[in-house]
Amino acid sequence: MVRVRFAPSPTGALHVGGIRTALYNYLFARNKGGRFLLRIEDTDVERSKKEWIDVITEGLRWLGLEWDEDIVFQSKRLGVYQEHAMKLLEEGKAYYCYCTEEEIQEHKEIARTLKKPFKYPRTCLKRSKEEIEAFEREKRPKAIRFKVPEGKTVFNDLIHGEIEFDNSEVEDFVLLKQNGFPTYQTAVVIDDHFMEITHVIRGDDHIANTPKQILLYRAFGWEPPEFAHLPMILGPDKKRLSKRHGATSVTQFREEGFLPEAIFNFLALLGWSPGDNREIISKEEMIKVFDIKNVNKRACVFDINKLLWMNSEYIKKLNDEELLEKILPFYEKTDWFKVEEHIDVLRKIVPLFKTRVKTLRELPEFSNYFFTRNYRYERKGLDKHFVDPRVFEILEEILSEIISLKDFDKESAERVVREKAKQNNVKAAFIIHPLRLVLTGKTVGPGLFDIMDVLGKDEVIFRIKRALKELRGFVPGKTAYPEGTI
Ligand code: GLU
């Protein structure tokens, strides 16, 4: 049975690269009817934090990347790593290293001066018995190093094909540090073995670690799993994607109002394609067609505009009630009002913006004028739509007609506006644009008559009256702009 794992270190947020690794592992497992496991690599006690574990698990759940078995925590398995390192030591496949941090630094310095890559010079493998006994007497701290055998290490990467390393390029890496903690290489191999991992799917920054790990498998007498190394993700400037490029963590995506389905779809296509030009693909469909062999070798660029587009597509797919439910926390965050007291008006507003927003967070922003009279006029709208003084006359006429309306609703509002345009021999747009600006301060937005309907008769009257007072006599470029114009 296929068994894969996602193995994050809880030393920071869950970023795009990590999510995509988790996602490909998940798709691979589901496609093969296998298991997707989660392992927390928390042996670096200083940098690992409980809160990051929560961020990771919540993020994975939010994205629908549920793991199938109990989480494995490396920090709880120190004894297993120590025992296995000792075994290699006893079998002569590893040795104690008494070198101090300073001594190692010195060697690194020398390598730097000689412009050579640093490789541990096997100092402790060559020590005399007397030297070792002296160190033992003074209880000098010691690490355990792996003795890299001669030869070549070759593996067949499922994405990159055959990769070969000469073992002479691989240094005698540390298995167990002086403090008794394992290094990443040790813990990863031992855990992948005992978790019965069949395929290791991870970022291609781990390619260089793979020969070390394969050598360890062999030393233990275990069969290595298959390896698949995913291409790097770059920012638009073709540099490795990082925080500099803006929002890249799950938490940020969530706060900015991205839907998990959109992130899922977008990241799945970042390096993989189902073989046709489809861009919007459901999770179920992806599970069906996912094939690790179709993953790109080359790095791919993270395009935020594409993600925004995809998110808007997923927002459009929601029905009005679903969208309302998802949007409430974003209105709550604005602190404008108690959302539960305004649920009816929100129920009317939210669908008006469904096709107009790219993120959920934009919705309160775009609809602010429904909740405040304190909006500003867009200057470019004034410049464009208030040039002809007839605008004021027609607004005046619309106002008195609305005041006398018995039943004010979307239809009657539309009738009044269109009639007045006709009577004045102008196109409806001649008055629709300035009226939108008067009622919302904006040049774009949902249909004017929908807006009027939601605002209601009294509010429409108030806003037209106020605008007539503020704007009468206004001539773009000549008279002063109303205060607060933006
Ligand atoms: N903890 C490692 C990382 O986050 C895991 C690498 C691996 O999958 O082997 O990069």
Image: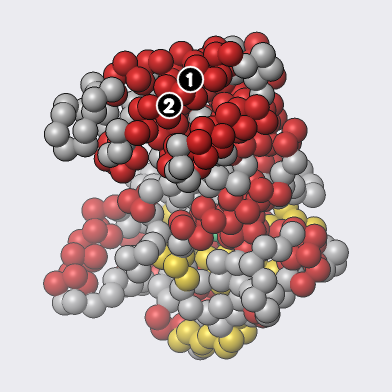
What amino acid is found at the position of numbered circle 2 in the picture?
Leu
Question: Which picture quadrant has residue 474?
Answer: top left
**Identity of the amino acid at label 1?**
Leu
Q: Is residue 369 visible?
A: no
Quadrant of ligand 1: it is bottom right
Name the residue nearer the viewer: 154 or 111.
Answer: 154
Query: Which residue does the image show at 35% across and 69% down from the upper left?
Result: 238
Q: Secondary structure at mark 1?
A: helix
Mark 2 Cα shell of 10 Å, populated few (<14), some (14-19), many (≥20): many
The label on residue 395 is 2
Quarter of the figure with the C terminus: top left
Looking at the image, residue 380 sits to the left or right of residue 326; the answer is left
Q: Between residues 94 and 38, which one lies in front from this camera angle?
A: 38
What residue is at 53 percent from the left and 79 percent from the top?
A: 297
Say if 258 sits above or below 395 in the image. Answer: below
| The N terminus - image quarter | bottom right
Query: Foreground residue, 146 or 201?
Result: 201
Residue position marked by numbered label 1 in the rendering: 399
Answer left or right for 297 relative to 107.
right
Classify mark 2: helix, strand or loop: helix
Query: Would you place residue 210 above or below residue 339 in this image?
Result: below
Nearest to the observer: residue 306 or residue 376: 376
Q: Is residue 258 visible?
A: yes
At label 1, counting other C-alpha atoms closer than 10 Å, the crowd grade (few under 14, some 14-19, many 20 or more) is many
Q: Position of residue 400 (x, y in %)?
A: 50, 17
Residue 226 drawn at (x, y percent): 68, 75
Q: In the rendered structure, are the residues bearing label 1 and label 2 in contact, judged by CB atoms less than 8 Å apart?
A: yes
x, y percent for residue 95: 48, 64
The residue located at (42%, 26%) in the rendering is 395
Q: Residue at x 44, y 67 (%)?
A: 301
